[in-house]
Amino acid sequence: MPREYARREILIKLMEFPCSALLLSLCGLQEVEATAERADEATAEALYGMGIQVDKCIGCGSCVAACKAENDVPEEPFYFRTWVERYVIHDDGRVQVDSPDGGIRGFTSRQEDGASVLRAFFVPKLCNQCDNPPCVQVCPVGATFKTEDGVILVDSDYCIGCRYCIQACPYGARYLDPRTKTADKCTFCYHRIKQGLLPACVEVCPTQARVFGELTSRASPLRRMMRMSELQVLKPSLNTEPKVYYSKLDGEVR
Ligand code: SF4
Ligand code: SF4
């Protein structure tokens, strides 16, 4: 049995017992070292971020399709690294949210009582690449970690598929890949940005609703957007310190 595979199998077996996270720490397995190393990395300065200009999103779904193709996301409509939600706000206070197949084929018009609709808009969502990420904190084997440039990644060689991170993420940004049984999510297209390319979703957006760049460079498109717009993040009260910043975000967005 290959060594990496054997180690993962042992860890999966251990996780079947109660208090297994504690057991793992007591056993002093190699993965604990990995957790410590990556905890150090978690203090690294955040470099990359994404801006989303809500008033520019037309809900075409090109970003969702490009992401699936670029990152080999399973085809089934429950697996997404990024998705688009439609919000419809009515004058009686009702808020309707839908995201058919993650918005990958765009949105068809709804049979609404047009007179009652106050406003409607699209909100692209993805992993927020939190600077204070609960998913990293709960991972018992250090498989979810922060890179030195502040991107949250999953090391599938270490991931044991326990789903702790999926439950801990307050943004619903993670899924368990049915093929590998490991956790997955948006990486800001880490393989692309390290080559100086844009994330696939940013590159294909026809309206430039998505803006990507370095938070530490004043000349980056993201910093320019930050200077020009008032920005919000999702669920700010959770203190996760997201690095996905929204402009023109409606107060009804959850
Ligand atoms: Fe982790 Fe969720 Fe934050 Fe992404 S959005 S870094 S998966 S807690
Ligand atoms: Fe919105 Fe751009 Fe995605 Fe189309 S590609 S849904 S405009 S963010």
Image (tube, rainbow, N blue to C red):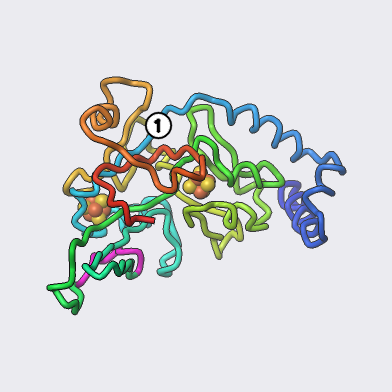
Q: Nearer the viewer, residue 16 or 233?
A: 233
Residue pointed to by mark 1: 48
Magenta range is: 101-108
Please state, as top left, top right, bottom left or bottom right, where the C terminus lies in the image. Answer: bottom left
Residue 213 on the magenta segment: no
| Secondary structure state at the residue bearing disc 1 | strand
Q: Is residue 37 above or below residue 15?
A: above
Q: Residue furthest front?
A: 92
The answer to which of 252 and 82 lies nearer the viewer is 252
Magenta stretch, main secondary structure, is loop
In this image, 142 relative to 55: left or right? right
Q: Residue at x 28, y 67 (%)?
A: 93
Tell me the residue at 67%/41% (across/down): 142
What's the residue at 20%, 75% (across, down)? 110
10 Å crowding of disc 1: few (<14), some (14-19), many (20+): many
Q: Is residue 203 visible?
A: no
- Residue 98 position, x and y percent, is 32, 68
Does residue 101 lie above or below 182 as drawn? below
- Residue 182, image x, y percentages: 60, 56
Q: How many marks?
A: 1
Residue at the left extreme, as displayed: 115
The quadrant where residue 88 appears? bottom left
